[in-house]
Image: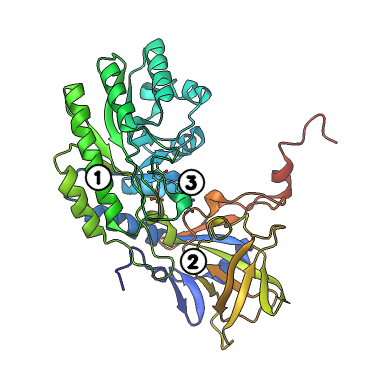
Amino acid sequence: MSKRLIEPDYTFQYVKNELTVEGVSVSELVKKYGSPLYVYSGKAIRESYGRIQSALNELPVQICYAVKANSNIHILSLLSKLGAGCDLVSYGEWYRAELAKVPREKRVLSGVAKTLTEFEALFKYPAAGVGSIHVESVMEFELIALLANAKHRKVNVALRYNPDVDAKTLDKISTGRKTDKFGLNEAEILKLAKEYRHDPFLHIEGISIHIGSQITQLGPFEEAFKQLKKLCTKVEKILGRSLGYVDLGGGIGVQYLNEKTISLTDYAALVKKYFSNYPKILIEPGRSLIANAGILVSEVVFNKTRAGNRTVILDAGMNDLVRPALYEAYHHILPLQQTKTKSHAWDVVGGICETTDYFARNRKIALKGEPGEQIAFLSAGAYGFSMSSTYNSRPRVAEVLVDQGKIKLIRKRETLKDLVKHELGPNHP
Ligand code: LLP
């Protein structure tokens, strides 16, 4: 079996038949903070950060955590204290980075639909409040150039290159094929470099790529790196100077079940092969930093049998963890208490009024299906809470971080009042 980037049961393990996180009983946390509940391990985050950092430590690498994976400001602050910068995709994420005190020069801003309103807000700060803006279209580039010149504000930009590489991951999380909406093609990049190479305010500082997520083979990375390097050489020739950095994006896959993941040593060797002579290399990991550092805990509400299928109904739904419903993604399910209960094949569903609200079908779990029985979805730290919603008017759940012997409620459970607060006002019914 491949070496796991983060052991799913490394910090989450059974002690005396009870699932624990860093030695704390998970069901005790549920008793205190309620169900469903996201629980994170600080130790797992620190270790995954350390693992990526040490694999790349011979190179001038800046890790820019992809905030979309888990945007809780406490997690952001923890990673920032370890030295991470961040990859942002909205003004909302920028605001979170501000609250978490991530140094502005360590922030990069990607996203295909940055609006004039967002730019107006960001241009109040020196260098638009970021280290660099990653531009994804010609029109966006022109807008930034216009604003920078009109406001006499110097900004750094990087051109996000779409290298037309198939990341060989799920279709729905591939981003680097020419048919995907992301980035600029080579012709657009070369033209922009030519036109703007002498711009007094806008400085082309780098080129970035991000070809997809949950990538488990090195081949697509190699293909993309090769093309990126070629393009960098062409752009540098046009600019008549070296670029300040390349950004290799995120995408390093993790183990959800037993899939083989890429070795960080091999990834680092690849980065070195192509970019060792660059002054700065950014990477934007999200999932590989946080996925296996978090679980979602849920309780059984009822069970029933549908066409012979044992079906267990949970208090969590696709609004709390949407990955199985959206991508048919696999999340391992463990009971919080290990008992002598026999494993049965279960359909595991939530309470949302949607047929797609299945967490698993025909999954063997040692569960009786009794109301109040507790389970945990593993590897739920990335794209778990951050993709959750209040669909069906269900308040979003709480989040708890266990770190260095401390238990911290890092997000309160939402209330019914929170659900309707923006609908209330002088004219409310
Ligand atoms: N950089 C950029 C520009 C991105 O768009 C993303 C993710 C990342 C970095 C981080 O990629 P990671 O290291 O996490 O693979 N919701 C999907 C994943 C969507 C990823 C979107 N972009 C899921 O739950 O699988």
Q: Is residue 27 above or below residue 411?
A: below
Label pair 2/1, CB-CB below 8 angstroms: no
Q: Nearer the viewer, residue 316 or 232?
A: 232
Are the residues at dot 3 and dot 1 in contact (C-beta closer than 8 Å)?
Answer: no
Q: Which residue is mark 1?
A: 225
Q: Residue at image x 67%, y 64%?
A: 315
Q: Are marks 3 and 2 in contact (CB under 8 Å)?
A: no
**Rendering colour mode:** rainbow
Q: Is residue 284 above or below residue 24?
A: above
Q: Quadrant of the N terminus?
A: bottom left
Return the residue nearer the eye: 351 or 356: 356
What label does residue 71 carry, if any? 3
Q: Position of residue 73 (x, y in %)?
A: 48, 45
The Cα atoms of the two marked residues, 3 and 2, are separated by 18 Å
Q: What is the distance, in whole Å, between disc 2 and disc 1 at their CAs?
A: 32 Å
Looking at the rendered structure, the kind of residue marked 3 is Ser
Which of disc 1 and disc 2 is earlier in sequence?
Answer: 1
Asked whether mark 1 and ligand 1 are closer than 8 Å, the reply comes as: no
Q: Secondary structure at mark 1?
A: helix
Secondary element type, mark 2: loop
Q: Secondary structure at mark 3?
A: loop
Is label 3 or label 2 in front?
2
Q: Is residue 307 above or below residue 382?
A: below
Residue sitting at the far right: 429
Residue 257 locus on image (x, y percent) = 43, 69
Pick the front one: 381 or 361:
361
**Can see residue 131?**
no
**Label 2 belongs to which residue?**
378
